[in-house]
Amino acid sequence: MPELQPDDPIKTRSYANVILIAIFVLLLCVSWSFYQEFIGLRPWRSYQTRFAESYSAYLQKQVRDREAAEKAVESSADYQKLQAALQQAEAVADPQDKAIKQQSDLVDLQRAAILSAFQTDRSLVGSLIYDYEVVPNTAAYRSEKQSHLQAVLDAEAKEYSVDWPEGDGKTVTRTFNYNQLNDTFNQLLDQKAQLTAKQGDIDQPVKDAQAAMAKLISDKLPGLTADQLDGLLKSARDMDVTLVQINVNPPGTQINDIGGVGLTDRCQSCHVGMNPKFVPAALTITKADLGLPRSNDAPFTSHPDQDLLTWHPLDTFGCSPCHGGNGRALDTVELAHGRYEHWLWPLNYPENYQAGCQQCHSADAWTEHAPVLNEAKILFRDRGCIGCHNYAGFDSQGQQLQDTDREIASLEKEKVDDNQKIPILNKQGDQAPDNATAQRLYAEATNLTVTVSKLDARVEQLDQLSHSLQQEVKRVGPDLKEVRLKLHPEWIPYWLGHTWNFDPTAQMPQFRLEPDEVQAISAFIWQQGLKGPALDKQAPGDPARGKDLFNSLGCLACHSIGEGSQKIGGDIADNLSREGEKANYDYIVRWIHNPRVRSAPYDPYLHRDLTSEDYTKHGLPFVFDVDHSRSPVDGHELVVQQQTIMPDFRLSWQEARDIASFLMTQKDASSHYDPAPFVNDASLYEKGRTLVVHYGCAGCHEISGLEDASRVGTDLTQEGSKPIGRFDFALLYTKAQDGILPDGQPLKRGNEYSSWYDLKGFFDQKLADPAVFDEGQYKPDPMDRLKMPKPNVTQDQINALTSFLLGSTQSTLPPSYQYLPTDQRQAIQDGWWIVTKYNCIGCHQIDIGQRTILMDLPAYKGDNAINLPPVLTSEGARVNPEWLKSFLANPSLSATDTDRDGVRQYLKVRMPTFFLSDDEVRKLVLFFGALSSQQQPFIPEKLAPLSDQERSVARAIFTSPAAPCLKCHMTGNPAHDANATAPNFLLAGQRLRSAWTERWITEPATIIPGTAMPSGLFVRQGNRWVFNAPLPPEAKNYTGDEADLLVRYLMELTPQEQAMLSGRTPVAAKSGSSSVKK
Amino acid sequence: MFGDWHQLWVIISTPDNIPIVAMLGLVPFFTWYAFHNMLANDRLIAQLEADPQLARTHHRTTYPYNSRWERELHTNPFLMRKELLAAIIITIILMVWALTLNAPLEEPANASVTMNPAKAPWYFLGLQEMLEYFDPWIAGVIVPTLIIVGLMAIPFIDANPLGNGYYTYHQRRHAVWTFLIGFEGLWLVLVCIGTFIRGPGFMWYWPTQTWDPDRVEFNVNRNLDQIFGINGNWLVHILPASLRPEAVIIARALFGIIPMVVYGIAAALFIHWICMRTEYSRTVYRKMSILQTVTMYIFLITMLFVPVTIFLRLVFRIKYIWETPWFSI
Amino acid sequence: MADQKDANGRKTGVLEDLKEKSREFGEIVKTKTQEQLEELKKPQETQLYRSIFRIKHDEDPRNRALSTLNNLFFHIHPAKVNRDATRYGYTWGLGGITFYLFIVLVFTGVMLMFYYHPTKVQAFRDILYLENDVPFGRLLRNMHRWAAHLMVMAVWLHMFRVFMSGSYKRPREFNWCVGVLLMVLTLLLSFTGYLLPDDQLGFWAVTVGTNMARATPLLGHQGPFGPQLGMTPYNDVRFALLGGSIVDANALLRAYIWHCIAIPLIASVFMGVHFWRVRKDGGISGPSPVMLEAETKA
């Protein structure tokens, strides 16, 4: 710088250092951003490294253990024996093998020796023949053709000399012409093939022995072999640290991704254990396996239910569609799991995992592998949630009925109008000024009559529909019209105010009612009850016999009895421990005799209950039941049954009295009820009515005047999609955000303290106590308070219901992911709604692995399990659908003798009559057929008629002392049947399917494990079943399939034949299975 | 529900609120620094005013001066190096900010789910706050237009030749105060109110008061005419029959003109009084053309109207001063 | 080539000849390389350097000045500035910082545009994509967002400084007006960008913002005299802003075009004017020597 002024502070000041530092800091920032990009925002890298380490260690141990175990097996006596056998087989096979090898080697040498000559000759001859053939076969070319022919012949005659091996290294020189070469070559090929086949035969025993050894190891040590484990170890050690991503792009996808552009799911980048590439389905690992039991940040377990992954393959479903979370984000656990304010699909907590199932399986009443969800759906109906809340798919018959009634009413009105018009038109026609007008008016009148008849037809159709629907409409709570006939008035207010004091397991929720509200409601209900007709007076019964019947008939599949730890039975209906305190004996007798009987039919068209006068006015007897369901007044369908799912056990009056007497003894001696004179106070009526409407009592109960009341709660079908802002946390808003529970305790989810300002938090708290959201608010009028009552649910049940609600979303998954099958599985889906509705699963096992209520009762434990109702897992394959239809309509299978079970009279537990609608019967039959993958419609297999010889063989088998069929199976002889444990063969012809029957008599335990039916009656010989016991000499030379023979015999068994044979069978001893099982 | 420091922290740490939080520090600093420079210059001015001899020879800045030093320096490197430094520092700030704080991304847009509170970006919160006090056409259209036009008009109505290119308070007191009141006293304060004070329902929450989306505010706002009980009874007698049913409305519309005119006059007098305070300002005032004077009065009167209205609303709960069927103020 | 013999009588063949020549060639390469490496020590002397920077960079005042004047980017500055104008305390470089932030925003914005579709279907997804998939995508988006905020802050503070130092006064009145417009454009740029992620935050901010337009006098359907002039939700100024009566796909597209094309273009033009006028109006305003009351014309 030429003119530097040394004292100029600006010019002399150097910024080099400052700029240097700034650049250095900038470089630091850039490195920081690189760190973030490659490490900070990629935590999965370290996860994968850690996984590889711990998994390798785990596998190493596994390999060691496995090798040791295999060694142990190899040193076992069994294995040694097999090894000896192998050595023996080898000793036999080896010399033969050697000889054959020699021969085979020689053949190879010989073939090699002539190969070159053969190939040369063959191609030469081939080309000469071609030359010959292309010469035209005409006179002009005759000589030429002749010369070509000669050339072929010469070539064929030409001899080749070959060094022909003779074995042992010796050779001789042989000459071959063309044909000899050809023949020899083919011979050698044949020889070689024969030798190979022979060698295979010789080696077979060795191979068998080796297979037996391998099988022994795999039997003794199931799971992966040491080699397979070693392969896994290698792949774990060589694992590339890399992003694992599932991309799915089905049309219309919105899986956790906006705008229908598909799924990007990277969960397995951290959850390495879920990756089948590293952890195959045959291996399941837990954190404990990896030595990380307490580590929070080791997301390394494998999926606990591998079956789910076979139905929902990872490459089409990924993880986040079912579990929630942000499948694309991997920066932090919080982001990836979507557990932040602005992600709409957060990861579900473990207790709510099955919410994911509901997203696509909302059309199912029962989803396999989703027990929590199934429980929730049963609870949702059974705890009366559907009484107030609409939910698509759940019982909508009431709604349909109302629509039908409305349509009938409007059609009727149309009919009346038209009918009035007809005479007017006719009259106008009579007075018409000219012929043409008259004709037109008459034609109009005629047309109207046709219209009216069409309307009639439509009304008739609707009446039939409503007949079916009337049978299907069920309410959770009892009919309150009959309250005066059934209950003690002083019990009602006590029950309303102290529901769970009276019955700690009550289905009915506890309403928040002030004492004056209780009185008003009681008064309204009481005054609204039917006052007649009076019930028949019943004589007292025998409580002891009643108790027996109660415990054995199957009542406990729905009802429970006993309190606290003494309680047994199902939760689907009331606990009856204090029944005697509340109910009238006469009413209970009628109820038990047939719970569907009503005191008066209700006419939905007239909106009132009919009386006997209505019937007498029309000259009809006061009779109303399923077969007499039309109103005498207007001709439309009446409500003729109680809308309860409780079925008719077809008991005699005496049995009903006995059970009722037993129930009347069920009371708490210390209980005390204040008299309730106010129930007759007419001034409370209006207030009571207002309250009953307000709280939606008519959602669960039938109440006079409120039969058509609609549900008072919100529709919950898509509750899980509601934005959080739509849920009213009221004064708990800040507490929820801070994670403080209503009781002041901090909320812990899993291991972490958490906010509960989310849908799960709301549902959990609302179900635990709906009133908390009123807390601290000034609501002087009780009617202003939140009206949802407190449901009677345990914490597990709350989790189930919360899962159900969380999954109740307007699904973001594409329609193709929804489980809405159109094939046979649709019948299964439809059927489960009915099966769960009537609690069929309380008695019957239908889904494999499903527990019934009865199974868990002490009375059916152990050997007594044979007294359980039949297992229905293969019912569709077992029975003829036509028969099943008639059985479901009338399980006694008899028009007169109804106090019995049609099939298994030897069981105390009895199949009751459910009065199913035709539609329900049809659906159930299709359901069972579909469960067993049966073709529809059913066409019975044509069975060949038995010849006399066959019949005698069959008889011999049937009555064989080794398997005396009639010893256990019923015969119709009461003395014998008292100890029988299996159905009557006479039913077989119309009831059973022959294919199933054959499988049943040969391998019953594979169909129903633990059945009393003995296995091993037949053994497989070649391709036929042979009876597994000595037979009389005349039967010995039967060469057909003996199981098939027996089935054909059973299918055409006549009562006479059975009676004739029953004499030949020893009478059964009740011990049942054990004596037969051999 | 005061003392909720967590709530305050949530507001302050919301990523999009960081700029206004930063402004809370930056603006006072720049204000202080401007005044620091102003006062230094003012001292020099006072010294020079007192000593005309010195004024003739003095280099007239407060910066170090030596006659041997070049009066002008090369841009490269003396300015460039500082610009380079500034660019680097800004980049560093930006990178650190971007690496530590993520830009917000909320739920996908959904017209059926209303945000509560639904707030504009922080720099427009002043306007949104104004919506609380004025009808949308004033707050959303007239006010921003006036602000822009008013800002652009400043150099044309500021007839003061002094203070051109150097900091001085003494020589342009009125300009400085006007701008401070407008920019800091109104605009930034309103932005801060919108950011820190307004919670769910755009209701008033004091700092550390918990935001409660369920809060209900009992709030009665009246119009000025209601306070005066204007009912138009006397008008009925004057009006033609066809207009009689609207007598109340017309009466209110007519009444509203009175306080507006009264305010206008009072504000004008107040401004005039301020302008006449010192000899120098009187000189400047005299130099202004009529157009300049009128424009200045209009803008200043309008600007002052904003705090007056806010005051009336917040303290006296007065909604409209002048209500007509077509517009209300 | 015929065999030759050298002085010593040895035969010199082709091979020897080649050896000799390559040795000579090696010498030349060596010397040249050394020479050119020497030259590289003065990069300013290279042809490449000169072709780019046009001038020799000798340490003399002329070259200093030329280095500024001959550079497209630098020549918005004069060759020389008032010595006190280089002090940071006068301007804080706020105008320059604003311009730098604008450049940063253009750069990051262009990068973001590679990944962004202004459609209802894709917009939000693209942001997720940027945050989780694009290399440095999150950083890019964050920098764009925060630079936008910083630019608004810088613009305001710049205005504050300009006012406080009286720099809007003659002859800079017009440039002040341009500056005011640039500030408005900055706010509009930031505001239009707010909607683009298509999330709740932007959606509702824009809804609140554009709802004000309903009330525009004369032009809005809820504004004074608007209905009287036939304004409805389907033809008023808000409809024009949003391309519809609600904030939807068209609004997104319009915001995108305004944000990425229209306003940056307009702002660039104004910026050009702004910088040009700074030069033409006599460079930056100060720090000027103070004036005294006595020196004003009465």
Image (cartoon, grey):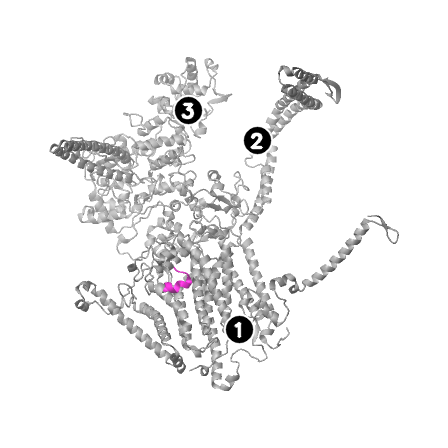
What is the C-alpha distance between the residues marked 3 and 1?
Answer: 106 Å
Majority secondary structure of magenta residues: helix
At a point 58% along the width and 39% down the height, the residue shown is: A229
Q: In this view of the protein, can residue A647 be seen by the observer?
A: yes
Rate crowding at label 1 as few (under 14), some (14 to 19) or many (20 or more) other CA atoms within 10 Å: many
Residue A30, x across and y down, in percent: 56, 59
Q: Chain of mark 2?
A: A
| Secondary element at image label 3 | helix
Looking at this view, is A1007 or A487 the one in front? Answer: A1007
Residue furthest front as drawn: A140
Residue C113, x across and y down, in percent: 49, 54
Residue that mark 2 sits on: A216
Residue that mark 3 sits on: A997
Looking at this view, is A280 or C107 the one in front? Answer: C107
Q: What kind of residue is marked 3? A: Thr
Residue A882, x across and y down, in percent: 34, 26
In the rendered structure, which segment of residues is drawn in magenta?
A: B119-129
Q: In this view of the protein, can residue A539 be seen by the observer?
A: no
Residue that mark 1 sits on: C85
